Image (cartoon, grey):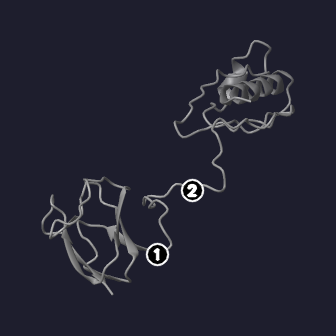
């Protein structure tokens, strides 16, 4: 039932109670109280005429809908459910599947891992977690990646023992070393 309908029903109940001579219930908020002068001015000589009702709805007043007697069908989903195997979306991009001998080298906060120690034959997988593109270039120029963006990866396999320094050409203060044993 709407707020207006509730007020109208209360008003009608007051009118019926006043015209039948029965005492009326307490007035609802915003209704005027009948005065003693109202009885003297009534046409029937003693039965007061109901006063005009002034209804003032406050901005904070909200009507609570009455429960419906009819059953409603459950809402039909409007979006396609995500299969459980995919999992919820994450804020951090996940690297692509890599070989079992892979070593992760995350790029975060404009920095590489300072030094990675790996076994000969290991594949280092750099994953860019920054919102700007980076590249990974061997200091001696023997290997290099293209620029890759957030969530993208680059991998390189180190087959011989040694120290391999690398840098981001776009951000030359970003340096790292892969130590192969």
Separation of marks 2 and 1 at Cα, in angstroms = 27 Å
Camera sees residue 18: yes
Q: In x, y percent, where is residue 49?
A: 73, 19
Please give the name of the residue rendered at 73% of the width and 36% of the height, measured from the top-left corner.
Answer: 75
Q: Which mark is residue 101?
A: 1
Q: Quadrant of the C terminus?
A: bottom left
From the viewer's perspective, is residue 34 above or below residue 163? above
Residue 155's image quarter?
bottom left
Q: Is residue 28 left or right of residue 135?
A: right
Q: Secondary structure at mark 2?
A: loop
Please give the name of the residue rendered at 34% of the width and 76% of the height, measured from the top-left corner.
Answer: 159
Please give the name of the residue rendered at 25% of the width and 54% of the height, measured from the top-left corner.
Answer: 146
Q: In x, y percent, where is residue 77?
A: 69, 38
Label 2 neighbourhood size at 10 Å, few (<14), some (14-19), many (20+)?
few
Q: Is residue 102 left or right of residue 82?
A: left
Residue 126's image quarter?
bottom left
Observer-nearest residue: 8 or 35?
A: 8
Q: In x, y percent, where is residue 50?
A: 72, 22
Instruction: Please name the residue that numbered disc 2 is placed on.
Output: 88
Q: Which residue is the extreme one toward the bottom? A: 181
Q: Quadrant of the N terminus?
A: top right
Q: In x, y percent, where is residue 163?
A: 23, 82
Q: Secondary structure at mark 1?
A: loop
From the viewer's perspective, is residue 97 above or below residue 148? below
Q: Which numbered mark, 2 or 1, is in the foreground of this view? A: 1
Observer-nearest residue: 100 or 142?
A: 142
Q: Which residue is the extreme one toward the top? A: 43
Q: Is residue 7 left or right of residue 46?
A: left
Q: Which residue is the extreme one toward the front? A: 160
């Amino acid at each position: 039932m709407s707020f207006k309908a509730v007020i109208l029903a209360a008003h009608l109940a007051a009118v019926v109670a006043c015209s039948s001579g029965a005492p009326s219930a307490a007035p609802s908020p915003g209704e005027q109280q009948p005065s003693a002068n109202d009885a003297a001015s009534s046409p029937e000589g003693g039965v007061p005429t109901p006063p005009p009702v002034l209804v003032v709805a406050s901005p904070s007043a909200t009507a609570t809908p009455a429960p419906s007697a009819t059953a409603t069908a459950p809402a039909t989903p409007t979006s396609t459910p995500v299969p459980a195997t995919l999992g919820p979306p994450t804020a951090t991009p996940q690297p692509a599947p890599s070989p079992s001998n892979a070593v992760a080298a995350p790029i975060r906060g404009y920095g590489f891992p300072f030094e990675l120690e790996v076994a000969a034959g290991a594949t280092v997988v750099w994953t860019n977690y920054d919102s700007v593109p980076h590249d990974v270039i061997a200091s001696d120029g023997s290997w290099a990646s293209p620029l890759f963006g957030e969530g993208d990866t680059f991998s390189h396999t180190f087959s011989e023992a040694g120290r391999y320094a690398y840098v981001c050409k776009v951000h030359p203060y970003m340096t790292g070393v892969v130590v192969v044993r």
